[in-house]
Amino acid sequence: MNNKGKLTKWLYWFLFAVAVILVYKTLDNFSAIGAWIKNLIDVLMPFIVGLLIAYLLYIPCRKVESLYRKTKKLKFIQKRARGLSILTVYLIVIIILAIGINFLMPIIASSIIDLVSNIQGYYNTLMTNIENLPDDSILNNEMVLDVLQSIQNIDLKQYINIDKIAEYAKGVINVAGGIIDFFVAIIVSIYLLLQRREIMEFFKKLGRAMFKEKTYHNFGKYFDRTNNIFFNFLAGQFLDGIIIGIITSIAMSIIGVKYAVLLGFMIGIFNLIPYFGAIIAVVIAALITLLTGGLGQCLIMVIVVIILQQIDANIINPKILGNSLKISPLLVIFAVPVGGAYFGFWGMFLSVPIVAVIKLLLTDYIEYKNSLQNEEVWTWTEGTLQKVQKLKQKGHS
């Protein structure tokens, strides 16, 4: 027995030493490990992109498939409902992208080039108008002039020109892994959508084999709820961004704002970031409108966009997202800047659903613990009452 205890003790310290060495080697070769992880991600990128595409198109494919399955008179369509639903959804996406590329992208690209080329002229006109204002005007003060001077010192041409736009486009292609990787991602997404039932059945069987029944059911429950939160948020935010971009572009065009499509497109993209995105977009749009259309048009544009943002925040966005994200604005204000500080745009974008999932887990944990405490209190109270009743009976007898 003594030798067995010594062996266990030595085995424990040996494993502890091995763990320390592994941690040291990991930290010592952190750059090499980081490079290995980066290469692995580059290799897996087509599959990751394919998974994301399949995830975003899952609900549309499922709804179209259900419509095809209802066509009982056409057996051919009913038997091939899944494949036809995927084909239909992809054709719709391709048509939307083609319309966007053929009509929107040329307008946006020409607007960017025109804005950068004429930014100095717009600035000079604005400064002339400010200098002609009365001395007691709120705009004719040192702070406003310093801000405008800072804007002038920003050399936008070094960031936005034809060569730079080509570089940015090339960079986007490189991030996606090239045209071949893009087609691989599309094929992966199609196979995932076609075989989604078989894939889910496999993971369900694996879960049942690995975990106890209670753990398996809890995992399945939280997987479904987490999936619902993320899907509703991602699909809802993208759809909301498209809607607000179109509405804002139309409203700005009616007002006569120059670069209305560009500014509306920008507001739609920034609207993907909860709370802060709308504020940043309005500030940028206001500055550009101030330079290109003057103070009056700028004020009208800001008022109209703020009204549209309020309609979106209180009517459109809640209708799209439903009740999937039940979190306080305070948590959003905390999550968005923290996510952006550590993970950039995607951190700002995904921080809200991640916080919603964490809140869901914490809320369920707190309720579970409180229910256990209530059961203990009830048991103790019930036992105490029985004891008191027995003592009264003895005293009475």
Image: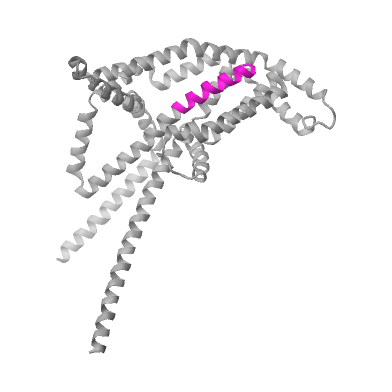
Whether residue 54 is visible to the viewer of this picture, yes or no, is no
Q: Is residue 3 above or below residue 160?
A: below
User: Which sits in the foreground, 9 or 154?
Assistant: 154
Q: Is residue 368 left or right of residue 298?
A: left
Rendering coords of residue 13 (x, y %): 27, 56
Quadrant in which residue 93 is drawn: top left
Look at 81% across and 24% down and name the residue there.
131
User: Which sits in the foreground, 14 or 54?
Assistant: 54
Q: Is residue 13 above or below residue 71?
A: below
Look at 19% across and 59% down and name the residue there.
7
Q: Please give the range of residues in magenta.
A: 239-258
Rendering coords of residue 65 (x, y %): 26, 23
Quadrant of image for the N terminus: bottom left
Residue 61 within the segment the image draws in magenta: no
Look at 84% across and 32% down and name the residue there.
136
Q: Main secondary structure of the magenta part?
A: helix
Rendering coords of residue 187 (x, y %): 29, 19
Quadrant in which residue 123 is drawn: top right
Rendering coords of residue 288 (x, y %): 65, 22
